[in-house]
Image: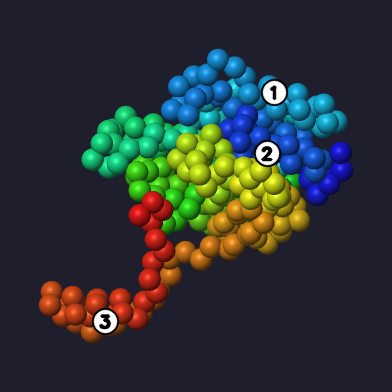
Amino acid sequence: MNGICDGRVVVVTGAGRGLGRAHALAFAAQGARVVVNDLGVGLDGAPGADSPAGRVVDEIRAAGGEAVAHGGDIATTEGAASLIAAALQAYGRLDTLVNNAGFLRDRMLVNLDEDDWDAVMRVHLRGHFLPLRHAAAHWRTEARAGRAPAARVVNTSSGAGLLGSVGQGNYSAAKAGVVGLTLVAAAELARYGVQVNAIAPAARTRMTERAFAETMAAPATGFDAMAPGNVSPLVVWLGSAASAGVTGRVFEAEGGRITVMEGWRPGPSADKGARWTPAEAGETARELLARAEAPGAVYGS
């Protein structure tokens, strides 16, 4: 297989199904050797009875590509470390990390308990941080040894993390945290030759099929805008050496549309040069809001 990722070694977490599977197949089709990670759990994070990672590896090999499976829990230090080690042991290098693993435990805030909060934070946030930490340590060692990598990280946020989503307070907070982590990692790791970006995808997965069944349904004919494979070309490009110079960015990807998201930045401002009274602060805040852009609507509102 030849393509823009020839010779690169790519790790994809949560790659047994949905978006992760589509990413793994797309990277392999572009010449990458792929480490397919998936714990094989249900929508709620409970252990599953099969090995979806192994099936994806079989698909890649059947198409003439190279891949190995990894079934560790990347939200643990041991699992994340073994994931990076798997790439190095199998192929002797690591070029790209795609953090994709996640699941849902949706509740309205008044019904959301600590276990549901912690479980989603664990997989989405710690499950991004730990593989990134171990991959970054490897790339720092390479850079210090004079082998500067053209390393890439693609994190997975969500429109829920950018705008919020009713009934998904835990998921929205975690995905907003992924954006913050992406910005910090891009700034800190640039000196080692590492670029870090994030995507906010909209596609049909096990998670979205349940939450947005009507929107995510496949059409009888024509372009399937919600097919997971629509998102993967952008991820593959971001994970390739061709994306040189692009870092610290968030892209929304849906169907045939790619959007560069523009995050928090100063809008209308006023400076009194002294302390405001509460009444003055309120009057000024209202005046500034009248000149500011209206925020996007929260999903489900």
- SS state under label 3: helix
- Where residue 44 appears, as percent x and y from the top left, is 43, 28
Residue 11 point in image, percent of width and height: 66, 36
Q: Crowding at label 3, few (<14), some or many (≥20) Cα neighbours within 10 Å?
A: some
Determine the secondary structure under disc 2: helix
**Left or right: 125 in relation to 186:** left
Mark closer to the chain start, 1 or 3: 1
Distance between mark 1 and mark 3 Cα atoms: 58 Å
Q: Nearer the viewer, residue 6 or 111?
A: 111
The type of residue carrying mark 1 is Arg
Q: Residue at x 75, y 52 (%)?
A: 241
Residue identifier under label 2: 22
Relative horizontal placement of residue 213, taking residue 25 as reference (left or right): left
- Residue located farthest toward the top when viewing the structure as drawn: 49
Residue drawn 55% across the image and 15% down it: 49
163 lies above or below 79: below
- Between 237 and 74, which is closer to the camera in this rendering? 237
Quarter occupied by residue 71: top right
- Furthest-bottom residue in this view: 272
Whether residue 212 is visible to the viewer of this picture, yes or no, is yes
Please give the name of the residue rendered at 80% of the width and 27% of the height, measured from the top-left corner.
Answer: 61
Q: Quadrant of the C terminus?
A: bottom left
**Residue 287 numbered tag:** 3
Residue type at tag 2: Ala
Quarter of the figure with the N terminus = top right
First along the sequence among labels 2 and 3: 2
Q: CA distance from mark 2 to mark 3?
A: 48 Å
